[in-house]
Image: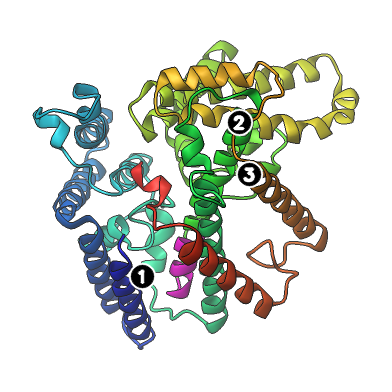
Amino acid sequence: MSNLLVLELTSAAALLFLLARLRLSHEARQWLFLISSYCFYAAVGRWAICFLLLSTLFNFYFGKVLKTHLRTWILWTGVIINLLFLAFFKYLPSLLSPSGEGTFLFSRIAMPVGISFWTFQALSYLFDIYREEELDPNLREFALYMTFAPTVLSGPICRLGEMLPQFRESKIASWNEVRGGLQRIWLGVFMMAVARLIGAGLIPNAGVDAGFARSGLQFLDVWALTIGYGMQLFFDFAGYSNIVIGVARVFGFVVRENFDSPYLSKSPSEFWTRWHMSLSFWIRDYLFMPLATRNRELWWRYSTLLFSMVIFGIWHKAAWTFVIWGAFQGCLLVIHRIYQKFISSMDLDDQAERIAFLGLPYTFLTICLSWIFFRADSLTQAWSMFGTALRPGAGFTLDHSYLWLVIVVVGCYFAVEALADRRGRTDETPFAWVPLELRFATYALITYVVFLRVIQARGFVYLQF
């Protein structure tokens, strides 16, 4: 987004905040947030608002049909139509015109921003109706659910059962909620600034982006890049999620948390309960569990787990790198399940407890290794880097400023998380032990330095998905 658009949206948010603090009925508040949300999406998505409206109308009225006639074939008709709608914009252009070049019709299709997120919200609505959950939104409420401004672009993926009671309240956010929301916003801005610093580097062409564009990388180069990218992706997406959660909180709404110190996980299974939680739990609730419960055989459960993670990868992009990334994650989860079953069957719980401290570095390094497939520009590059990462060597060809940047960021991340755990997480941020004034001053200073002195504006990484 351009600086002018950011300024305009910030001004509009400030005006909306003042209007939202008026004593309005819940219907008037719904209209206020609905109109504001459509204006926000139109400013960012432009023509794509037509497709958001189409999806909203289709799913609302299809949901009414499904509620009246609870038939499996009716549910799957709605699911397939939604998936075809998503695939037309997200997958068809890359499948039929992989290079993105030429005059081929499908290469010119532009993906509506946020379509993956609001399509999954629509699907969860249909699944919940089929499960006979008590959902009775009117069209205004459902439209607000689909286009709610804080979450419409990149989540967190919400559930109507969580949002509908909040839409029906006339509640005005307390000043404590406003203060907490502002803290989350500033923390998010700070984290995204750090992500951009990692991507661009301390000096020109000395960051993750330039590193992945190079050839002839050595063992240490690849590990520095994949760990750096893992931190960049975390700070970027978790930072964005903090901003979204903070904005919603300022207006009196509570949306799902998306990250919970994921790099402190001691197993791959734990990692996926802490990373992109709204999508992870969506996959678990609406894909893995319904499939896994169809057969009690272990091979079926492991196959379902692997399949679910492949779908997780394809959700991001229709490319072989993401298929392999999802399969890699699925294999890590299956291996962990097999390990747990082996420990239990052999009564080795005490021995496993003694080496439990190895779980954190194992999980961190294997997850970071998988980011190669998530970030690589091609399958050839991904396999080359993956092979290099498994062949130990001493060579390092990247700029040393980048290496020190990664070391400092990783060290600070684990140090802050450890201090937060030791002092108790009594606040919504891991910096609860730092005085509020010092927190704001630090966020403001580093954000200013990074955004205005180090790098040029760059788009939010996860917006492409």
Q: Secondary structure at mark 2?
A: loop
Between marks 2 and 3, how big is the CA–CA gap? 30 Å
Residue 314 position, x and y percent, is: 38, 28
Judge whether 390 appears above or below 166 on screen: above
Viewer-side residue, 354 vs 232? 232
Q: Is residue 243 magenta?
A: yes
Tell me whether the residue at label 2 lies in contact with that at label 3, contact meaning CB atoms closer than 8 angstroms: no
Judge whether 210 appears above or below 290 on screen: below
Q: Which mark is residue 397?
A: 2
Q: Secondary structure at mark 3?
A: helix
**In the displayed structure image, the side of residue 175 where residue 77 appears, left or right:** left
Give the amino acid type for the residue marked by disc 3 in the picture.
Pro
Q: Is residue 428 magenta?
A: no
Q: Secondary structure at mark 1?
A: loop
Viewer-side residue, 458 vs 322? 458
Residue 254 position, x and y percent, is: 48, 64
Q: Which residue is mark 3?
A: 262
Indicate the quadrant containing the N terminus: top left, top right, bottom left or bottom right: bottom left
User: Dot 1: within a 10 Å radius of its alpha carbon, few (fewer than 14), some, or many (20 or more) residues?
Assistant: some
Q: Which mark is residue 168?
A: 1
Magenta region, residue range: 242-252
Between marks 1 and 2, how big is the CA–CA gap? 58 Å
| For marks 2 and 3 on the same chain, the one whose residue lies earlier in the sequence | 3
Q: Quadrant of residue 2?
A: bottom left
**Overall secondary structure of the magenta section:** helix
Nearer to us: label 2 or label 3: 2
